[in-house]
Image: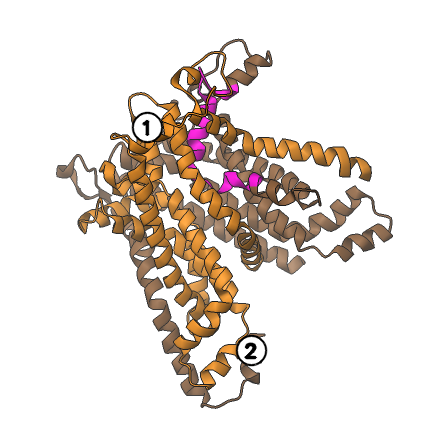
Amino acid sequence: MAREATLAAPVVRPLLSRRARELLTGYCYLIPVILALGCTVLFPILKAMQMSLYNHVLIKPQEYGYVGLANYARLLHDEVFWLSLWNSFVWVFGSVTFQFLGGFAAALLLHQPFRARAVVRTLTLLPWIIPGVVVALIWEFIYQPNYGLLNDILSRAGLMTERIAWLANPSLAMPAVILANIWRGVPFFAIMLLAGLQAIPGELYEAARMDGASVLQRFRFVTLPMLKPIIVVATATRVVWTFNYADLIFVMTSGGPANATQITSTYTLLQAYSNLDFGYAATLSVTLLLIMLAFTVLYLRLTRGLESVA
Amino acid sequence: MERVLGGPVLWIGLVALSLFAVAPFVWVLLASFKTRVELYATPIVYLPATLSLANYVEAWTSRLTPFSRFFANSLWVSSVTMVVTTLVSILAGYALARFRFAGRQTFLLVFLATQMFPAVLLIAPLLSQWYALGLIDTYQVLIYSNLSFTVPFTVWMLVGYFESIPRELEESAMLDGCTNFGALCRIVLPLAAPGVAATAIFAFVASWSELLFAITFTSQTEMRTLSAGLLFMVGQYEIQWGQLSAGVIISTVPVAILFTYLQRHLIQGLSAGAVKG
């Protein structure tokens, strides 16, 4: 469409000078963004790569020095790192699966016409927009063993005899933080899939109904295939985002008890904040970056595959 | 079958969904009005006897955790981040939407990729960089750092908005003697105003929620933002759940209000961006 417009416009100036001017103006407009992201993203990433090659512990300045790949060798033998990778997998898989299922159900519900729909939509989307630390504190309060909401509900319902310290129990802490994350992420899928549902032409459903398709068949053969691209994109975005997301666990458990909720991103924070080991923290950052790049390549392959099928 | 799905199932589902989303908020909102006795009673007292604002007053005026100061800090940092983000991304978004220059595709890919970079990855190198520049405990450093996650997203959104505005309007303006920049300000921006407003609010809300940069690059109480202040409050010897709940509500209300406005635009923008990406 843009190309048609260019052709339709009367040609007043010679083509070359126009192109040259576009080039120049375009680059000028990009200078601020290059400065902004250069200083806050690109340079720090290069810096992290360099830092990962040094022994750089803030409280031991006398040991500072170039160590080559020693930090990476240490990483390969670090049991907590491998544990954190496994925990990250559980965290991502548990969170995204249930966020998706809940969000899909929510989107189907919110797509129906009913009174007060706008109000219900806004309310159900709220958990997504509030600050992460607020989500963490709300759920920490709910899980509080002595005067928290969850224990009270369970004991009133007769399901529990002894108070449970949800976040202090190594086998319950991970499900507990995942539930908080599900609460926060359901609206994301709801909002994306709702937009997808609204974009499906009504005629498709009409035609399916004419052919005698039941509700379930219409869902299976119209809704699902039409939503497929947005499902793939939303899920992939969410997987990457959840993998990187540290705030919630950092505030609720700091990766404890006994590393039961230590995911790779909180482990990176731990190295930087508690151990002040910046070399090793940078090594973990670079590793995170590599894992993410691998995932992005995989994801691009996947979506390209989808396009060629469609 | 359809009648069951449309009637009871729909209503039960809606009630369950609303409860799941809202109950935790209601719980904290109620707690913020409770007295100390009510907060720590067993079994739990759900409804406070009076709607006492004592927790809010205490949190707002406390010397140890002054929420009035945190609120002002958050407001300033988020507002300036919003303005800078918007200016930077209008220019970049317009250039990427309109001009065909070498490296345009690369730029677009970089913006898409940077959206995936987590704060965790940048913490260590940014801290040593800001420390070397002597910028620790300043507002600037929080604003600069926030650009790392606001700008990639807003540029990506604005490219979409600008592309949806027909080129002919600017071209006729330029034929009438407008410069390119003039056409951008007088023709394109008024038309793209809803989209620009939505991305600006996004930048505000995202910096309002930011936690890791705020706790890493500031150390003094009076420089803390709301998120950092809340976390600091937890770090005290005993958690004051009443004040903390009040603090939680104070931090939530502004973004909740902005979000109700933003919602409509964001849904469209997200789905447009998602389908394209």
Give left or right: position of A70 versus A92: left
* Percent position of residue A137, x then y: 42, 30
In this picture the colour scheme is: by chain
Residue B27 counted in the magenta span: no
Residue A102 sits in quarter = top right
Q: Is residue B9 above or below residue A142?
A: below
Q: Please name whichever residue, B106 or B144, is drawn nearer the observer in this view of the structure.
A: B144
Give left or right: position of A238 versus A283: right
Q: Residue at x 51, y 29 (%)?
A: B26
What's under tag 2, amino acid-wise? Arg
Give left or right: position of B183 versus A186: left
- What's drawn in magenta, residue-wise? A123-150
Identify the main secondary structure in magenta.
helix
Q: Residue at x 39, y 24 (%)?
A: B242
* Percent position of residue B3, x then y: 81, 38
Q: Are marks 1 and 2 in contact (CB under 8 Å)?
A: no
Q: Is residue A129 above or below residue B56?
A: below
Asked if labels 1 and 2 share a chain, the reply is no
- Subunit ID for the residue under disc 2: A
* Percent position of residue A38, x then y: 31, 59
Q: Please name whichever residue, B244 or A170, is drawn nearer the observer in this view of the structure.
A: B244
Q: Which mark is residue B58?
A: 1
**Colour-to-chain, orange:** B
Query: Mark 2 sits on what residue?
Result: A3
